[in-house]
Image: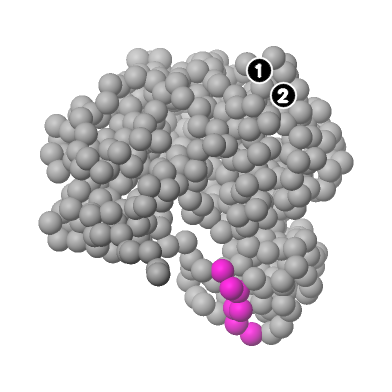
Amino acid sequence: MSPARPTPARRVSLISLGCAKNRVDSEIILGQLRDQGFEIVRDGEPADTVIVNTCGFIDEARRESIDTLLEAAGRKGRDIERLFVAGCMVNRYAEELAAEIPEIDGFIGLDDLAAAPQLVALGSSSAPSQSASHLVFDHTASRQLTTRGYAFLKVAEGCNNPCTFCAIPVWRGRFRSRTIESLVAEAATLEAAGATEVCLVAQDTTRYGEDLGLGKHGLARLLEALLVGTTAPWIRFLYAYPTTLDDEVLGLMGSEPRLVPYLDIPLQHSHPEILRAMRRGGGPDRYLRQLERARTLVPDLFVRTTFIVGFPGERAEHFDHLVEFVQRASFDHLGVFVWSPEPDTPSYHLAGRPPRRVATDRRKRLLDAQRGIAHERRQRLVGRVLEVLVEGPCSETEHLLEGRHAGMAPEVDGRVLINDGTADCGRLAQVEITDAFADDLVGRIVGPAGSPGVVVAGGSWAGSASESGWLEG
């Protein structure tokens, strides 16, 4: 006899906003709900409860979170009955949200992920205290994966860095590493669930293990354990703080083909005066030497960074210095944020804020400068055969596949568009690059790689994996 379908009162959808670390939290919430018999449905389908997992990192992210909450609030009484809020904004702005959006029925704080089924079943909850999270969820916490072919592995929670622009330590707490044993166990579970790529994430991934007595080589020890304890073809780590990046990690990356040749090292600025005001370690010369060293240790290294423009005190000469630095460093991928005035941070009180229109213009100018660099670096790949993780049909047309080569991190670094050949979603394939643009590459499948199940043929997509049906964001 087949099990009874959940009643409508047990139907839940979730909208996840923000970074990869937030996505892991979303997957834990979904896993807890699934284990307690809730039916997870797509956003937009009729549901008893919609959960919005918010991001509060900068004002742009907060606006997106508020807009999403307001849109969901407008659906109450039509295709949804209750609205819950989760994520960073709960721990930081719960009281304000409760006052400004009375349609909100309940809150799931950063420490309450495991309690999500009980809170949702009650149908309402009061705003939690606005305090920092102190829990770290380990491999015993059920997760409902929402990605295809890859999965994020959160190795630590919180942050100890004194950056004057960031409020993450206020609501995420101090840096707390998970044990190597727990992480290897979860990585093996993710691999068994279909993850060809495991991406390590934290607020400061290269600081992993300091609080466990592993010293400055903690990330290297973790990577070694993952190489032994799993067989995932690709292992990647994101968010390398420049002052805690270990040459031993780079040496391991250069010698182990399963550690993808990719370095995400957010530098935030190049001018010494702005870096001091940000309380960031290092400087432009040290950064350039570090990049040169990394490229020596890791052949074919791909490098991503992020910068902040419009920081208080940033003058035209500071910005010009940053543009010149970007041209010298020759990054493969680059993101730019406009400084956001965060009330809980030291930079909020600094004088000399550039006008918003000036900061926005600088962001555009820096991205324009990077486009030529990115295009030139991608042109070097034309004619090469690269291993590509196929992620499914292109979002713009079903007549193309899309995927990523090892030098592209999930969700942030562009795509490889495949116009000839077929492959199963989540599998690796050999792709010859035939054209290059500033954002994307174009290629054709020329053979299988990594995992079995790739079929080479002309024509349209023949993948077997379906779209994730429970998450939007």
Amino acid type indicated by mark 2: Gly
**Image height of 182 relative to 73, above or below:** above
Q: Earlier in the sequence, mark 2 or mark 1?
A: 1
Q: Position of residue 137 (x, y in %)?
A: 50, 32
How crowded is the residue under tag 2: few (<14 C-alpha within 10 Å), some, or many (20+)? many
The residue that appears at 63% across and 16% down in the rendered structure is 211
422 relative position to 43: left or right: right
The boundaries of the magenta stretch are: 459-465
Q: Which of the 4 image quarters holds residue 6?
A: bottom left
Per the image, label 2 sits on a secondary structure element best described as helix
Look at the image and say whether residue 156 sits in the magenta stretch: no
- Residue furthest out toward the front: 1
Q: Main secondary structure of the magenta part?
A: loop
Identify residue for label 2.
Answer: 218
Look at the image and say whether residue 462 sits in the magenta stretch: yes
Label 2 – label 1 distance at C-alpha: 8 Å
263 relative position to 66: left or right: right
The residue that appears at 23% across and 55% down in the rendered structure is 9
Amino acid type indicated by mark 1: Leu
**Image height of 200 relative to 180, above or below:** below
The residue that appears at 58% across and 49% down in the rendered structure is 151
Q: Position of residue 28 (x, y in %)?
A: 45, 42
Quadrant showing the N terminus: bottom left
Per the image, label 1 sits on a secondary structure element best described as helix
Identify residue for label 1.
Answer: 212
Q: Kindly indicate whether the residue at mark 1 contacts the one at mark 2 (C-beta within 8 angstroms).
A: yes
How crowded is the residue under tag 1: few (<14 C-alpha within 10 Å), some, or many (20+)? few
**Image height of 460 relative to 154, above or below:** below
418 relative position to 366: left or right: right
374 relative position to 269: left or right: right
**Image height of 318 relative to 21, above or below:** above
